[in-house]
Image (spheres, grey):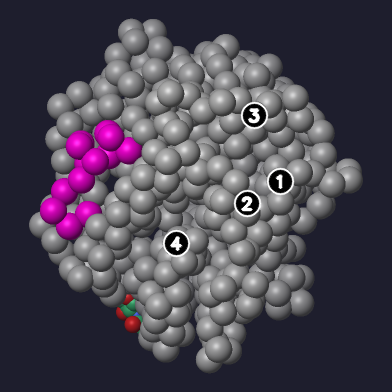
């Protein structure tokens, strides 16, 4: 399961304060490699990457969900509601593209509807669609963003509420942990699986919590917080959680604890829910969960998967979804291990030009059956956070390498292609919406920061982020 970074847009808008170790904020001279002028060029190159893929989507796939970038067609992959457009809205705003932003918001307000007979993933629908609608709503409502749409009348917020209400039946389980999928018209299907992943149940709090605040209706926040409590109540004696759980009995059906596949964003949303809402219950759970992960899963600089009860190692594998972790550690103020782990993960990227889904740490080779790189953002996101915290120019070299990999290896006729085998760089006819919503965005943010004092995110007309902590949220959270 993908580690979503959708919440990032919301965090931007609510002025999330990055709680990095203050000692890490040592500004160093930029490397010979990437001067501020070159950072500007790289930022423009990334902008060009965005439009190559966005225009390809609009021309060949819209209003289907996702682009087929090799054959220049489209496909419905989630609910059939212009997923890639919804997921791209905030990036259009970041790029200052008011015309595309405004016309897209208007189209969505007029044409999207959720009373459709489709069974969809609660997790993917929340992080990509609900999150996309909510962040675009906040952007379109606020003069200060420079993206205010005069005719806008809460259409996206109303859509978000309608969608979230259609997801609510999934939470009607004895444990409070939601079913993995729900039908938008009928509620939970009769034969729906009762097994869900920890990430699937624990990665909903940000979007639902924001919706509760905007609608002044606590129900959305309540059900998702209850789901987190349901998962955490079933942790092992070691404070580890497994990968899959039965939402009726509360029994773990897959007991491999790790920070990658099926669990990843459970950790991420604990910390970000605390940062966004200031709710200390999330912080306490995060602190215990994080300490256990560092004790049982961290094998400096790698992370392994262990049995959640015995802590016996089951998989000595680098899993590409783990790559969000150093970024999360920056937010938690734990920079040193983040630096070492990022360096190790990037060494895998360097070796192949991309990270494979699985890299075997025992044989130091690509894991059979896990050879693909589906344009994932996680390592790039961590690169951005680490650069933001340390201003170490090495991270700009990393970003430049990544741009080169994508431009030479993944660029294809109408967008960017999945890589089905990182050893042979074989392209596949698919482009997930998160390529535009996350992968390209974090590259753009990285080079924007490196542009220097007149970067847009920190110093542009709209202050997406403040530079320092204030008050109690500063310092090291762990
Ligand atoms: C919903 O879709 C399912 C299968 O796709 C179909 O069997 C069912 O009849 C549909 N229900 C309605 C009310 O359209």
SS assignment for the magenta stretch, majority? helix
Q: Are marks 4 and 1 in contact (CB under 8 Å)?
A: no
Q: Residue beneath label 1, please? A: 467
Image point (37%, 68%), residue name: 85
Position of the N terminus by quadrant: top left
Residue 411 location (% of width, % of height): 20, 45
Disc 4 from disc 2: Cα separation = 14 Å
Report the image quarter containing ligand 1.
bottom left
Q: Residue at 51% across / 28% down in the picture?
A: 30
Q: Nearer the viewer, residue 437 or 252?
A: 437
Write the residue at 30% across / 18% down: 351
Residue on which disc 3 sits: 27
Near-viewer residue (119 or 390): 390
Does residue 24 show up magenta in the picture?
no
Q: Which residues are magenta?
A: 403-415
Pointers 1 and 2 in contact (C-beta within 8 Å): yes
| Mark 3: secondary structure | loop
Query: x, y percentage for residue 84?
Result: 35, 64
Mark 2, Cα crowd under 10 Å, few <14 / some 14-19 / many 20+, is some
Q: Mark 4 or 3 closer to N-term?
A: 3
């Amino acid at each position: 399961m993908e580690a979503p970074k959708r919440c990032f847009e919301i965090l931007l808008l609510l002025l999330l304060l990055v709680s990095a170790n203050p000692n890490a904020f040592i500004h160093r001279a930029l490397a010979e490699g990437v001067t501020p002028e070159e950072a500007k060029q790289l930022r423009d190159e990334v902008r060009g990457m965005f439009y190559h893929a966005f225009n390809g989507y609009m021309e060949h796939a819209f209003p289907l969900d996702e682009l087929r970038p090799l054959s220049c067609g489209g496909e419905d992959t989630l609910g059939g509601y212009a997923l890639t457009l919804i997921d791209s809205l905030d990036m259009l705003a970041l790029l200052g593209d008011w015309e595309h932003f405004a016309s897209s918001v208007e189209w969505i307000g007029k044409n999207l509807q959720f009373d459709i007979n489709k069974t969809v993933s609660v997790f993917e629908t929340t992080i990509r669609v609900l999150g996309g609608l909510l962040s675009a709503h906040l952007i379109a409502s606020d003069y200060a963003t420079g993206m205010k749409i005069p005719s806008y009348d809460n259409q996206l917020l109303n859509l978000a509420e309608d969608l979230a209400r259609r997801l609510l039946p999934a939470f009607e389980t004895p444990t409070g942990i939601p079913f993995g999928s729900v039908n938008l018209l009928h509620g939970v299907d009769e034969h729906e699986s009762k097994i869900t992943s920890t990430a699937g149940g624990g990665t909903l709090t940000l979007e639902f919590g924001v919706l509760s605040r905007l609608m002044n209706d606590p129900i959305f926040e309540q059900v998702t917080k209850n789901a987190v409590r349901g998962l955490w109540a079933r942790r092992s004696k070691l404070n580890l959680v497994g990968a899959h759980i039965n939402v009726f009995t509360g029994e773990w059906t897959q007991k491999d604890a790790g920070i990658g596949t099926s669990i990843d964003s459970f950790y991420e949303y604990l910390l970000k829910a605390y940062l966004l809402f200031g709710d200390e219950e999330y912080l306490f759970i995060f602190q215990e969960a994080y300490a256990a992960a560092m004790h049982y899963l961290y094998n400096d600089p790698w992370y392994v998967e262990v049995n959640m009860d015995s802590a016996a190692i089951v998989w000595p594998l680098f899993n590409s979804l783990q790559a969000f972790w150093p970024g999360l550690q920056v937010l938690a103020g734990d920079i040193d291990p983040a630096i070492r782990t990022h360096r190790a993960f990037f060494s895998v990227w360097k070796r192949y030009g991309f990270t494979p889904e699985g890299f075997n740490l025992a044989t130091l080779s690509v894991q059979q059956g896990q050879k693909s790189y589906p344009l994932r953002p996680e390592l790039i996101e961590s690169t951005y956070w680490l650069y933001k915290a340390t201003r170490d120019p090495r991270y700009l070299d990393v970003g430049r390498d990544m741009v080169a990999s994508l431009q030479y290896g993944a660029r294809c006729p109408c967008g960017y292609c999945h890589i089905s085998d990182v050893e042979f760089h074989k392209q596949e006819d698919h482009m997930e919406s998160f390529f535009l919503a996350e992968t390209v965005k974090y590259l753009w943010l990285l080079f924007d920061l490196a542009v220097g004092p007149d970067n847009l995110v920190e110093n542009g007309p709209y202050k997406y982020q403040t530079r320092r902590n204030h008050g109690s949220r500063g310092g090291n959270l762990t």
